[in-house]
Amino acid sequence: MGNFVDVKELNKQNKYIQNVKLLVEGRGLKAFVYTLGCQQNEADSEKIMGTLQKMGYIITENEEEADILMVNTCAIRDHAEKRALSIVGRFKHYKAKNPDIIIGVCGCMSAQEHQREKLKHSYHYVDFTFGTGALHRLPEFVYNALNKKKRYFDIDSDTPAIAEGVDPLRASSYRAWVSIMYGCNNFCTYCIVPYVRGRERSRKMEDILSEIKDLVNKGYKDITLLGQNVNSYGKDLEEKTNIAALLNEISKIEGEFWIHLMTSHPKDASDEMIEAIKSSPRTSGHFHLPLQSGSDEILKKMNRHYDLEKYLSIIEKLRKDNEKITLTTDIIVGFPNESEEDFQKTLEVIKRVKYDSIFSFIYSPRKGTPAASMDNQIPESEKHRRYDILCDVQNDISREINESYIGTVQKVLVDGKSKNNEGVYTSRTQGNKIVHFECENDYTGTFKNVKITRADTFALYGEII
Ligand code: SAH
Ligand code: SF4
Ligand code: F3S
């Protein structure tokens, strides 16, 4: 099938892996990967590190000692791109000291032509760049760089094929990402993702299920199914299926684990999917449903294909007989033409739905997207003013909801010692709420019950029982 990288190509890459290994192994060479962006990029970086390790590199968290440095970039907002370029800029000094160092840039930013050109012409020490669809070809790129071949700047196709069998080096031994699909077909007018990650491609259900079974056998307790719009999972497969069917199959797997979805698009949230979410205790704890704006006018201009009424009906269905579910969302403020009235409508929805928390973003024009050339762009100062108001409104709601947890007992998955607080452990509920507690024993990676004694806007605090 054209959707999947064929065995011949995978074998070719495996040969490159062996060839790089011959050059690298036994020399104590180290690799450093810097990751920007969303969970998809985190998952991709785990595959990059898995491949680098397979080739004989030792993964390091210290960039100064690395022999190969990679930046996995994000293009979602201007800030992310600036950060990527400043990190690539920082790497110049290492190459100046040691010309044998290899520098690669990958991810969503390097899939854009203007950024690729910039990296080619203004960052002469970058050896190669490639987009998210060519990740399985990393061995070839590294091999060529080691052999001082010409600098290489790969161009992703519109529909890059899915490569199975590129094993990740997972950062955690109990929380895992599992990509169920790649790319996006939605072309929301503000968003760069469809341009840099290509069209929707679903993994085969059997591949996803076997990965999840393997994770559960290894003791993983929290699995996030990744896709830009997981609600349209399966539509592109030869053997048509859907997200509800996938969730129902996952619920047959034995073991104690939680499942999250990241992310769902409201336009494709079917009743069947909502029922599948609610019917399993593994999935019914949390749902993230991006709203973007509370104004129908703006939603239309964003090309979101739902209105507020439809959105609120999904929230209502999710909550019916399932009141404990935590809800989160994404909001963009300052989209072109957003009037004060439109913004007030967003605030009203925030107050009405009462999300547990929200991810709010200041609109950032992305080159080549329709919204970037719309009239009536909102001044920066006004965007910031709206952003601050939105955060204030949500902070009060988050605190109020968190305080309602005081006195309750919450099951949490322990994440380890808190960074700044001696003797304090940090953990998360199934609904993704952060819970801190004092404890003498290290229960990292296991489920525990915590009695909540205190709460603020961003976390719950309690005692382990
Ligand atoms: N596929 C996911 C979103 C991925 S991007 C979905 O559709 O829900 C994550 C969030 O970044 C989006 O939900 C949106 O709120 C925000 N975002 C995307 N493009 C943006 C832009 N140009 N400026 C500001 N925020 C943006
Ligand atoms: Fe971007 Fe919209 Fe696709 Fe999400 S659904 S990735 S916001 S285009
Ligand atoms: Fe960024 Fe690409 Fe994710 S643009 S948000 S890393 S899909």
Image: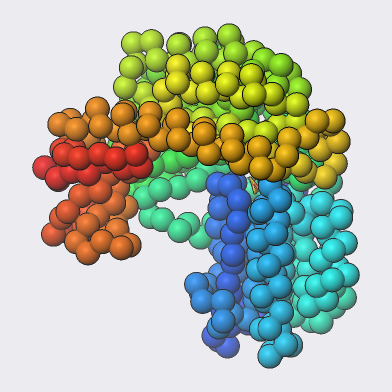
Question: In the picture, which quadrant includes the N terminus?
Answer: top right
The percent coordinates of residue 363 (x first, y second) are 68, 38
Left or right: residue 128 compared with residue 448: right
Q: Examine the rendering and report whether any part of residue 232 can be seen.
A: yes
Left or right: residue 396 compared with residue 329: left
Specify the quadrant of the image occupied by residue 230: top right
Nearer to me, 261 or 24: 261
Left or right: residue 131 compared with residue 449: right
Instruction: Give the residue at x 77% y 43%.
Output: 366
Specify the quadrant of the image occupied by residue 232: top right
* Colouring of the image: rainbow
Instruction: Give the residue at x 56% y 32%.
Output: 330
The percent coordinates of residue 37 (x first, y second) are 61, 51
| Count of all numbered marks drawn on residues in the image | 0
Q: Residue furthest bottom?
A: 97
Instruction: Give the residue at x 64% y 20%.
Output: 342
Q: Residue furthest left?
A: 465
The percent coordinates of residue 348 (x first, y second) are 51, 18
The percent coordinates of residue 116 (x first, y second) are 83, 60
Question: In the picture, which quadrant includes the C terminus?
Answer: top left
Instruction: Give the residue at x 66% y 75%.
Output: 90
Nearer to me, 412 or 275: 412
Q: Examine the rendering and report whether any part of residue 15 can be seen.
A: no
Left or right: residue 222 compared with residue 145: left
Nearer to me, 181 or 394: 394
Specify the quadrant of the image occupied by residue 423: bottom left
